[in-house]
Image (tube, coloured by chain):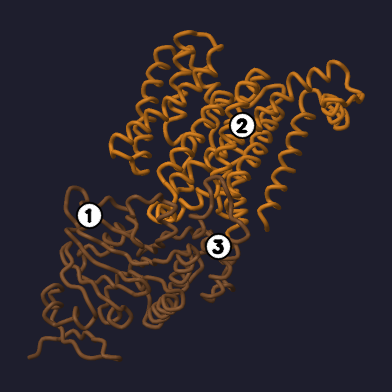
Chain colours: A brown, B orange
């Protein structure tokens, strides 16, 4: 499902946080939203998820999200926030099952199929052995995988991930991003994620959207967006950009010489 | 251990405490007689209980309503506390958080001081509890246009202090009524069949609504944004649970006075034993809260017999060590 964002604006507490943002995440591709702190990356994701009031139009698979009932929206878009609240004594299995919420009626309970979907997702993410473990007893990498498992049990064609690699070491960052990429390829998922590591974003995303001060300032293939000029201007950082694997750009910080 | 195990265990404990509550008192009644007399009251069943008419009178006119009211009030306070804890995502929230106790305290004091008659006390307590919560909710809601839970809690604190100040002032005006006011505040489940009948409809409706929201409270426990992203209208769920929990609290307060401790400690103890899912915490709190208060009442009316201790004193006196025991016994879970 393609996500189209057209002229989206968001005000928080009377202050404009997003202004006229237009972007597109094509079906089956990964769009990474990058930008300096406070650029409005997370706000954009929340607006797409319908968690904030916005002006402009956001469509998912051609349907405007504003008109969707909450449950229908949750069947189209799955969202993992930057710092998810994990109830300490809830088990991994129970937490993954929460992803089936959009399919359960208000007074209802999970069906056998819901349990089966959650079980299959846990299996796929290598979490079956942890199913009975309380969330408070997970490592950082396990937590991130569990949050991903909950999003996947939603079986939504679009995955919105807000900084999925926060607080993860190098190995776990790679593990989580590889996992998301595999799921995207195998299931044809559309992925929209914010990522603050520019090199990581360039490695994994098909397209980048550079945001600065609430506006979309550049969009396109990683090589088109990650230029020294744009990065220097919007991040206020001295960088040099080299060629990495598969011709994808790698961003290096430059230390002043002398 | 499974959810069904804990619920069954709590039901057995409640039944045992209620039976003990029926048997024990100034005049002891035999177990067999009590059971047969109860069976005899079932439709289409006729058995001879062997109880004397006097014993049957004690059983049906004094003990049975008392035990039922104790179970109802305890269950309501505990399940309402669990509901509040789910809404506020805070295991220390209690059913009196939003001004229910202060509202009821004020209206009951008014009735006792101004009217001087005890007849209207339950109704006044009910109206005061509902009024206190409405006041806090209105205040919290208008302050944030939609209301975060933190603002609502602060509004509850403000309303509680304000109403308690008025109540204290009224008490000072009529010091001779102090004892009656305090007797009500410390709680009593000896109100008889009138109270049972008045409380029962609210108990059934409020408890049913709360129990049906266990799954949704579990969804709310991951935060409002994620609950909304999962397709749940978090604000609406919270409001429904808050209304049902406040109704349960008002019914409990009107029937039993301001009994403390049950509403915060029983759900917390239950959570330590059986896990944090509200699908277990809510039904288990209902059953365990009932058992706890029936047990507390049994102690209140036997320890200094023929005198009676106020039940509110017993709940805290027995409850605190009991709670510490549970904390110690489940300490391993945390490490």
Seen from the viewer's position, the closer of residues B68 and B277 is B277
Q: Nearer the viewer, mark 2 or mark 1?
A: 1
Mark 3 highlights which residue? A91
Seen from the viewer's position, the closer of residues A130 and B308 is A130
Which residue sits at x=40%, y=43%?
Answer: B235
Q: Position of residue B263 (x, y in %)?
A: 54, 38
Which residue sits at x=54%, y=50%?
Answer: B215
Residue A56 is tagged as 1
Contact flag, marks 1 and 3 (Cβ < 8 Å)? no
Q: Position of residue A185 (x, y in %)?
A: 42, 78
Quadrant the C terminus of chain B occupies = bottom right
Question: Disc 1 on helix, strand or loop?
Answer: strand
Question: Disc 2 on helix, strand or loop?
Answer: helix
Mark 2 highlights which residue? B204
> Counting other residues with Cα less than 10 Å from the Cα at mark 1, is it few (<14), some (14-19), or many (20 or more)?
some
* Residue B32 placement, left or right of B6: right
Marks 2 and 3, how far apart at CA: 31 Å
Q: In this view of the protein, can residue B320 be seen by the observer?
A: no
Seen from the viewer's position, the closer of residues B162 and B253 is B253
Q: In this view of the protein, can residue A121 be seen by the observer?
A: yes
């Amino acid at each position: 499902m393609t996500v189209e964002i057209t002229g989206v604006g968001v005000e928080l507490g009377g202050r404009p946080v997003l202004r006229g943002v237009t972007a597109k995440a094509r079906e089956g591709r990964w769009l990474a939203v990058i930008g300096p702190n406070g650029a409005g990356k997370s706000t954009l994701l929340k607006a797409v998820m319908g968690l904030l009031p916005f002006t402009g139009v956001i469509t998912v698979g051609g349907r405007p999200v504003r008109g969707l009932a909450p449950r229908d929206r949750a069947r189209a878009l799955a969202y993992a926030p930057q710092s998810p609240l994990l109830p300490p004594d809830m088990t991994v299995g129970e937490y993954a099952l929460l992803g089936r919420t959009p399919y359960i009626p208000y007074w209802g309970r999970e069906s056998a199929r819901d349990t089966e979907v959650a079980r299959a997702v846990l299996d796929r993410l290598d979490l079956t052995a942890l199913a009975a473990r309380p969330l408070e007893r997970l490592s950082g990498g396990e937590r991130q995988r569990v949050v991903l498992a909950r999003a996947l049990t939603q079986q939504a064609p679009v995955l919105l991930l807000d900084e999925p690699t926060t607080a993860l070491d190098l190995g776990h960052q790679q593990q989580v991003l590889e996992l998301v990429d595999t799921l995207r390829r195998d299931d044809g998922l559309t992925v929209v994620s914010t990522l603050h590591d520019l090199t990581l974003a360039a490695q994994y995303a098909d397209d980048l959207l550079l945001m600065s001060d609430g506006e979309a300032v550049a969009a396109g293939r990683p090589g088109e967006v990650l230029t020294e000029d744009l990065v220097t201007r919007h991040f206020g950082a001295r960088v040099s950009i080299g060629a990495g694997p598969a011709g994808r750009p790698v961003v290096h910080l430059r230390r002043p010489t002398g | 251990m499974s959810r069904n195990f804990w619920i069954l265990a709590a039901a057995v404990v409640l039944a045992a405490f209620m039976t003990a509550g029926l048997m024990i008192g100034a005049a002891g009644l035999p177990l067999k007689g009590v059971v047969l007399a109860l069976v005899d009251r079932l439709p289409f069943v006729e058995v001879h209980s062997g109880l004397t008419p006097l014993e049957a009178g004690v059983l049906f006119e004094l003990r049975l309503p008392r035990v039922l009211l104790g179970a109802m009030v305890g269950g309501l306070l505990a399940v309402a506390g669990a509901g509040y804890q789910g809404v506020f995502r805070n295991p220390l929230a209690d059913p009196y958080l939003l001004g229910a106790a202060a509202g009821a305290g004020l209206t009951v004091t008014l009735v006792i001081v101004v009217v001087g008659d005890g007849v209207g006390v339950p109704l006044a307590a009910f109206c005061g509890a509902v009024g206190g919560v409405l006041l806090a909710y209105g205040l919290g809601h208008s302050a944030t246009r939609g209301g975060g839970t933190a603002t609502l809690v602060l509004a509850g604190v403000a309303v509680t202090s304000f109403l308690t100040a008025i109540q204290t002032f009224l008490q000072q005006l009529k010091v001779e009524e102090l004892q009656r006011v305090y007797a009500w505040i410390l709680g009593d489940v000896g109100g008889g069949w009138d109270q049972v009948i008045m409380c029962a409809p609210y108990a059934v409706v409020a408890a049913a609504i709360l129990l049906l929201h266990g799954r949704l409270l579990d969804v709310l426990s991951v935060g409002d944004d994620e609950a909304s992203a999962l397709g749940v209208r978090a604000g609406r769920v919270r409001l429904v649970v808050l209304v049902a929990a406040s109704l349960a609290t008002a019914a409990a307060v009107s029937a039993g006075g301001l009994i403390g401790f049950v509403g915060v400690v029983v759900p917390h103890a239950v959570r330590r034993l059986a896990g944090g899912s509200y699908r277990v915490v809510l039904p288990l709190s209902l059953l365990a809260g009932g058992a706890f208060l029936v047990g507390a009442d049994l102690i209140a009316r036997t320890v200094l017999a023929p005198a009676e201790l106020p039940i509110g004193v017993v709940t805290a006196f027995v409850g605190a060590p009991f709670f510490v025991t549970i904390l110690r016994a489940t300490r391993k879970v945390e490490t």
